[in-house]
């Protein structure tokens, strides 16, 4: 573990000292050439393991909804093994995350894979806690309400011009594998985040197949 994390409280729970430096955005989301200088934060063993389980699942699923070409390398190189490890190979026809390339046959088709939205919501709660600490040196406590919802990507110029914002961050990690905007409101210290994954995902809810979204919006209240 890096010395700069030793003895620091875990950014996720705040209850235990860090045992590792956790990558906020898991290395498995990125191609090899994109894995340098990824953001890390102090994390305890329990939180690191729980977050890793979510990442293990989502790195198998999310590339199916990708827009950027580089995700094809993730699909063809790793996705069969990841789907098998997550026991998902038998359920790829359940509608939710869509792609126009059939990685199994190599023929164009409309392929669907299951998407457990509870897992991405939980993962992005971890991610926002880490980013608030990384960018602003502050912690989100256990009483903070964190809302994670699907949304449409807002152009940077529109979001950054919002009034009443005390601090903001705009960042891209990897080849736009993760792109995000973070805003802290002046008086309340509430925060608002927009995340675009793999340069935008084409996803839809199981119960609302017509509802598609390409952005994940996270709001925190009462910090």
Image: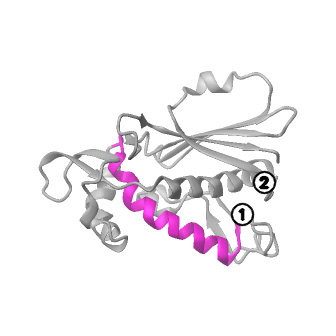
Q: Which quarter of the figure has residue 200? A: top left
Q: Which mark is residue 12?
A: 1
Find residue 216 and report its horizontal and vertical position in percent: 54, 42
Does 200 sit left or right of 47 as displayed? left
Vertical comparison of 116 with 221: above or below? below
Residue 70 visible from this viewpoint: no
Label 1, residues with CA under 10 Å away: few <14, some 14-19, many ≥20: many
What quarter of the picture does the N terminus occupy?
Answer: bottom right
Does 80 sit left or right of 146 as displayed? left
Indicate which disc, 2 or 1, sits on the residue closer to the N terminus. 1
Residue 190 visible from this viewpoint: yes
Vertical comparison of 187 with 24: above or below? above
Q: Residue furthest right?
A: 187
Give the labeled residue for mark 2.
Answer: 140
Camera-side residue: 162 or 98? 98
Find residue 95 and report its horizontal and vertical position in percent: 30, 48
Label 2, residues with CA under 10 Å away: few <14, some 14-19, many ≥20: many
Residue name at image x 58 percent, y 66 percent: 51
- As helix, strand or loop, the secondary structure at mark 1 comes to loop
Report the span colored magenta: 42-68
Does 206 sit left or right of 27 as displayed? left
């Amino acid at each position: 573990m890096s010395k700069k994390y030793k003895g620091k409280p875990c950014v996720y729970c705040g209850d235990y000292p860090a045992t590792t430096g956790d990558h906020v955005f898991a290395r498995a989301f990125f191609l090899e050439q994109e894995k340098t200088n990824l953001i890390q934060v102090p994390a305890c063993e329990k939180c690191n393991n729980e977050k890793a389980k979510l990442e293990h699942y989502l790195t198998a699923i999310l590339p199916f909804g990708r827009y950027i070409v580089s995700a094809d390398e993730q699909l063809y190189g790793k996705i069969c093994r990841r789907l098998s490890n997550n026991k998902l190979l038998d359920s790829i026809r359940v509608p939710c995350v869509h792609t126009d390339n059939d990685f199994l046959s190599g023929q164009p088709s409309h392929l669907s894979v299951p998407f457990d939205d509870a897992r991405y919501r939980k993962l992005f709660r971890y991610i926002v806690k880490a980013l608030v600490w990384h960018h602003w040196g502050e912690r989100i406590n256990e009483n903070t309400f964190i809302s994670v919802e699907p949304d449409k990507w807002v152009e940077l110029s529109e979001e950054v011009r919002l009034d009443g914002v005390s601090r903001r961050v705009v960042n891209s990690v990897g080849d736009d594998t993760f792109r995000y905007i973070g805003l802290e409101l002046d008086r309340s210290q509430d925060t608002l985040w927009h995340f675009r994954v793999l340069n935008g995902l084409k996803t839809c809810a199981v119960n609302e197949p017509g509802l598609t979204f390409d952005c994940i919006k996270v709001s925190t209240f009462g910090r």
